[in-house]
Image (cartoon, rainbow, N blue to C red):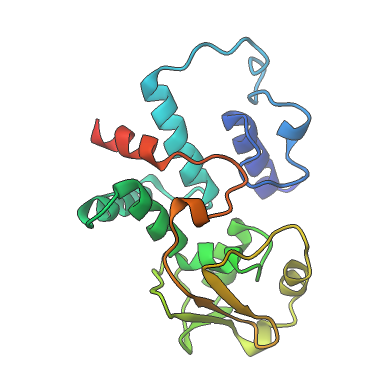
């Protein structure tokens, strides 16, 4: 098993949920925490513990981004007008790596970050290799021509495992995706329940 898959599986077991909805996740058969004490009885979780887990789960989902990046995203969501929890989800879904994964150009968020970092995508015709690059409504992301026949891309596009959400418009022939609008929480097809309001409580307490 690769180190990357091993890490993802440990994360699933740590939170006790299949947060990426992957069919091979170990929690499908063994919903216990990793380690020799993982099968022990779980104690009642405090409010702080619930808030921390909500934060960790959301952070893990987007490729286990760094705490510094995640906190900066929260701070930006808090500065903006409107509901901070909804703003947070909108900002996370506006990340280029999340968008590439959501558009089914690659199979996972981890693959998307690597794909972007290696220079395989353009935004509005310009090569962009920063996963945290923030998209705006109307932006068009395309796979560079020399990268369109990569097995990773062809396999992901042909997979029936995930649906592309309505806030993304795909042109499979041109291998482009348009960011139609910033989504709200209910628009995002998370495999598990995400609780951004708990994340807001965590950082504001």
User: Is 43 drawn above or below residue 110 in the view shown?
Assistant: above
Tell how many labels: 0
Q: Find residue 39 and report its horizontal and vertical position in percent.
A: 68, 15
User: Is 8 drawn above or below residue 142 in the view shown?
Assistant: above
Whether residue 194 sits left or right of residue 110 in the image: it is left
Q: Which quarter of the rendered picture does the N terminus lie within?
A: top right
Q: Find residue 41 and report its horizontal and vertical position in percent.
A: 62, 10
Determine the residue positioned at 65% across, 88% down. Answer: 174
Whether residue 61 sits left or right of residue 34 in the image: it is left
User: Is 103 drawn above or below residue 77 in the view shown?
Assistant: below
Place residue 159 in its image quadrant: bottom right
Q: Find residue 166 and report its horizontal and vertical position in percent.
A: 56, 67
Q: Which quarter of the rendered picture does the C terminus lie within?
A: top left
Q: 125 and 47: which one is in front?
A: 47
Whether residue 124 sits left or right of residue 144 in the image: it is left
Q: Find residue 114 and report its horizontal and vertical position in percent.
A: 58, 65
Determine the residue positioned at 69% across, 41% down. Answer: 6
User: Is 202 drawn above or below residue 173 in the view shown?
Assistant: above
Determine the residue positioned at 78% across, 62% down. Answer: 160
Determine the residue positioned at 61% across, 77% down. Answer: 170
């Amino acid at each position: 098993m690769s180190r990357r898959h091993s890490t993802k599986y440990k994360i699933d077991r740590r939170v006790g949920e299949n947060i990426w909805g992957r069919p091979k996740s170990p929690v499908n058969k063994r919903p216990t925490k990793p380690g020799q004490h993982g099968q022990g009885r779980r104690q009642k979780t405090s409010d702080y513990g619930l808030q921390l887990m909500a934060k960790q789960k959301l952070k893990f989902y987007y490729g286990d981004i760094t705490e510094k990046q995640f906190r900066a995203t929260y701070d930006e969501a808090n500065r903006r007008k409107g509901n901070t929890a909804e703003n947070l989800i909108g900002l996370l879904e506006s990340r280029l790596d999340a968008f590439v994964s959501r558009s089914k150009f690659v199979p996972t968020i981890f693959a998307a970050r690597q794909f972007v970092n290696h220079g395989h995508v353009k935004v509005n015709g310009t090569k962009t290799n920063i996963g945290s690059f923030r998209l705006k409504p109307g932006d068009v992301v395309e796979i560079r021509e020399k990268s369109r026949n990569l097995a990773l891309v062809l396999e992901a596009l042909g997979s029936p495992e995930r649906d592309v959400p309505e806030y993304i418009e795909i042109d499979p022939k041109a291998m482009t995706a348009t960011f139609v609008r910033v989504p709200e929480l209910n628009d995002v097809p998370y495999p598990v329940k995400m609780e951004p309001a708990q994340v807001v409580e965590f950082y504001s307490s």
